[in-house]
Image (cartoon, rainbow, N blue to C red):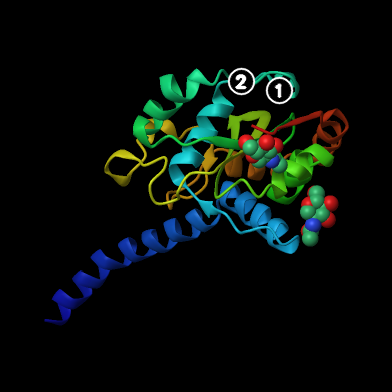
Amino acid sequence: MAMAMSLLAALLLPALLLSAASAADSKNNPADELVALVNSNRTASKASSLSDNQGLGCIALQYIKAYEGQCDQVSDKKPMDSSFTDTFAPNCGVQATTLSKITGRLVGCQSKYAAPSEAFGILVNNAKGLQVLHSKNHTEVGAAVSGTDGGGPYFWCVLFSDGKPAASFKVDGGEVPKAAYHPGCFSGNNDDCMGATNAAVALTGAGASRLVVAAVLAVAFAFAFAL
Ligand SMILES: *[C@@H]1O[C@H](CO)[C@@H](O)[C@H](O)[C@H]1NC(C)=O
Ligand SMILES: *[C@@H]1O[C@H](CO)[C@@H](O)[C@H](O)[C@H]1NC(C)=O
């Protein structure tokens, strides 16, 4: 009996440790942190708190991928609107009929990884950005953070919509396909988030002189689109 119990414990313990680890990981999602910053800044200026939609978050990650790592393009180019129906939604398993209007976008990029609070400052860096952030037209939000594997540039994207949170950007079977994830993270899901977080750890672990060089060379681009 005792032996059976300890065998059971030996089998269960790793499983418990594993689930504790993954629970910690999903709380450690920079895209969710970005949404929290968006919402606290909105409510501080009497705008509504927005619903975090995983389908829209996944689309924000595909939106970033459309730039193919070209950091300087976020200032003046945006993906074609047809990309939402042609590639972003299908990649995310989002049902085409549930796509809702995009009412604002914040896109930013920097050669060096930035924590969510710093990224927020890069994304909302002028009056136009603040207007998009505080717009009363939005009801929901999705955010994504991405880096190419093993380094920068690092992109952030926040998409806003006026859709009904429970009925828009609905994901087939309720789960975004794994292929839509990496590299990067998006808001509104409870999955592990790798990529940008790992890269940040790698950066912190780098030699001080390399960090100084990275800081000197950091170049940021950001743009806010009203629609
Ligand atoms: C909201 O964000 C803007 C832009 O970063 C900042 O200037 C402002 O202080 C923030 N407001 C609050 C209450 O944090
Ligand atoms: C809100 O939506 C209206 C109608 O589409 C538009 O004219 C207006 O510019 C939007 N406001 C903001 C802050 O984006």
Q: Position of residue 17 (x, y in %)?
A: 39, 64
Residue in view at x 29 percent, y 39 percent: 172
* Front residue (pair 204, 195): 195
Quadrant of the image for the C terminus?
top right
Q: Position of residue 11 (x, y in %)?
A: 24, 64
- The residue that mark 1 highlights is 71
> What is the three-letter code of the residue carrying label 2?
Tyr
Q: Which mark is residue 67?
A: 2
What count of labels does the image hold?
2
Q: Which mark is residue 21?
A: none
* Front residue (pair 190, 197): 190
> Above or below — where is 169 with respect to 25?
above
Q: Position of residue 60 (x, y in %)?
A: 54, 35
Q: Are marks 1 and 2 in contact (CB under 8 Å)?
A: yes
* Front residue (pair 41, 211): 41
Extreme residue in the left direction: 1
Quadrant where ligand 1 appears: bottom right
Q: Is residue 153 left or right of residue 140?
A: right
Q: Position of residue 181 (x, y in %)?
A: 45, 35
> What is the three-letter code of the residue carrying label 1?
Cys
Quadrant of the image for the N terminus?
bottom left
Q: Is residue 149 visible?
A: no
Q: Which SS class for mark 2? A: loop
